[in-house]
Image (cartoon, grey):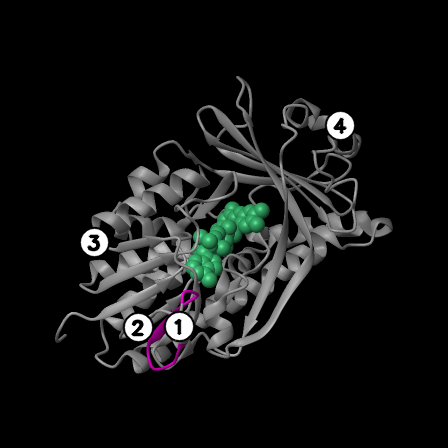
Amino acid sequence: MSATRHAEVAGGGLAGLTVATALAQHGWSVRLHERGSQLREIGAGIFLWENALRVLEELGAFEEATALGDAIDSWRLFDERGRPIQNDWMKDGSTRLITVKRTELHQALAQAARRSGVEIVTGSQVSGATPDGELLLETGESYAADLIVGADGVYSAVRRSLGLDLNVRDLEDGCMRHLVPRRPGDVSGEALEYWNGGRRVGIVPVTPDEVYIYTCCPAKDLEGRRQPFNSASWVASFPDIRHYLDRIPDQSRWAAFHDVRTHSWVSGRGAIVGDAATAMAPNLGQAACVAMVNGFSLATVLNQHDDVPTGLRAWERRQRGVSDATQKYSRLYGRVGTRWPRPLADVRSALVWLAGRSESWQHRVNVAAHSGADLVGPRNS
Ligand SMILES: Cc1cc2nc3c(=O)[nH]c(=O)nc-3n(C[C@H](O)[C@H](O)[C@H](O)COP(=O)(O)OP(=O)(O)OC[C@H]3O[C@@H](n4cnc5c(N)ncnc54)[C@H](O)[C@@H]3O)c2cc1C
């Protein structure tokens, strides 16, 4: 490859930091613009599947991101009658799953970006980009680059300005995320999810001292999404896990789920990645994992192409299938988990139980986790 190539990246979330670091590690000069006054991540815990763990290893951020996390051996689902309907949901032994605190992950990626020489500019709001490689700021300034990446989230200004929008949908469901103190006897090495009607509660260890709890429901469930957290209403739906629900602090906030569809992820020298391109409800714990994989892959594919627009098209061709499939199964999971008619709850339990018996079906649903090997090759250990 000839002279140093330059990239401008919009967005300092998990996707922006990943793509910026990967590009810098391939010899690019990279400037990252974050509109916030500082780099920060909102949320409590996060599932990191094999595909994202491989990316962290490649970027040299694995140890820092996962040092306090929990290796999850099984993910169990229970229905409204307390019956286990899945024992090893999507876990087939070949894919690792580690749950970590979001802030730990974000910090580890930010450190990796700094170590790799990425220039991070905070308080810098991007207003758009052009296909011939110009990044535009709200201030009226503009920067020319060989590559522009929009990693600026669900309502991406870069995506809109490049004309890539197809459909951005509020899925009318969402959740509240909570970190509660971890007590002796609490869940360890496994993730638990409880269903009752359209409500779901997940209980997941994330550090030696904290458990991550998510409480999901349809947006129209006003009691379920009430702020401050409506403990009595959730305990009424899930009395068996009252000992966890009682610990939830009052200040938790509602996060709506979104689904982003695009005509394409690329236009000339411009590309979008992360929620800007592939936002989905976090039902499979894969939205950020897919974002990180796509960001990492963008740098590796461009490394094989002198011509940036050609490389970007090759990158989209390579990554699109797994991302589309993951969005599709996430939508299906949302329909089954959140919008299933209550009188047919037993039918749902039977179907979910049956789905768990089919290895090929589970593999298809979790295709993203298995795609890690395609990305960076087989694991040594
Ligand atoms: C409740 C919940 C639970 C989840 N759990 C999981 C999970 O377990 N596993 C998983 O893989 N995924 C999960 N996800 C999804 C995951 O959080 C997202 O996919 C991921 O954070 C997206 O990262 P991103 O960098 O693309 O976008 P964002 O996190 O939205 O980051 C975008 C960044 O760009 C900045 N920005 C926006 N506009 C501009 C602009 N114009 N100029 C400059 N900067 C800008 C923002 O300030 C922000 O810092 C979950 C999501 C939710 C809501």
State the extent of the magenta-drawn residues as a range: 130-139
Q: Earlier in the sequence, mark 3 or mark 4?
A: 3
Residue wearing tag 1: 271
Q: Name the residue nearer the viewer: 268 or 311.
A: 268
Looking at the rendered structure, the secondary structure element under dot 3 is: loop
Give me the C-alpha separation between circle 1 and circle 3. 21 Å
Q: Which residue is mark 3?
A: 117
* Label annotation for residue 147: 2
Residues 102 and 191: in front is 102
Name the amino acid, label 3: Gly
Contact, mark 3 vs mark 2 (Cβ under 8 Å): no
The reply to whether callout 1 and callout 2 are in contact (CB within 8 Å) is: yes
Binning the other alpha carbons within 10 Å of mark 3 as few (below 14), some (14 to 19) or many (20 upward) gives some
Q: What residue type is disc 4 on?
A: Pro
Badge number at residue 43: none
- Residue type, numbered disc 1: Ala
